[in-house]
Image: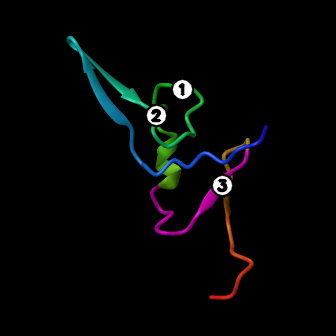
């Protein structure tokens, strides 16, 4: 089954567990889930546009078929 999962954060969740600080992926692009690997850095210039990312991490802008 295919599904679209929307990730709206461009930075990780920071969780403290005892003395340890964990950075959990919130952008959906980390190759080390659930932990952040810094992949969110490529999302910082998205603005209000919508993008999907291919397996190589290349951003593809989603365009509407409907006129504005």
Q: How is the image coloured?
A: rainbow
Q: Residue at x 68, y 88 (%)?
A: 67
* Magenta-drawn segment: 44-54
Q: Is residue 49 magenta?
A: yes
- Please tell me whether the stretch drawn in magenta is mainly helix, strand or loop: loop
Residue farthest to the right, as pictured: 1
The residue at 66%/48% (across/down) is: 4
Q: Residue furthest top?
A: 18
Q: Position of residue 57 (x, y in %)?
A: 66, 46
Left or right: 53 with respect to 38? right
Mark 3 → mark 1, Cα distance in angstroms: 18 Å
Residue under pointer 2: 25
User: Which residue is pictured at 47% across the width and 48% down the height?
Assistant: 41
Q: Between 44 and 6, which is closer to the camera in this rendering? A: 6
Name the residue rendered at 55%, 39% in the picture. 28
Q: Which mark is residue 13?
A: none
Reading the image, the residue beneath label 3 is 52
**Can you tell which mark lies on residue 33?**
1
Label 1 – label 2 distance at C-alpha: 6 Å
Q: Secondary structure at mark 1?
A: loop
């Amino acid at each position: 089954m295919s599904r679209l999962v929307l990730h709206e954060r461009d930075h990780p969740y920071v969780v403290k567990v005892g003395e340890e600080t964990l950075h959990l992926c919130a952008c959906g692009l980390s190759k080390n889930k659930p932990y952040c690997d810094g992949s969110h850095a490529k999302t910082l210039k998205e603005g209000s546009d919508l993008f999907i990312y291919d397996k190589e991490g290349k951003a593809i802008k989603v365009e509407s078929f409907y006129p504005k």
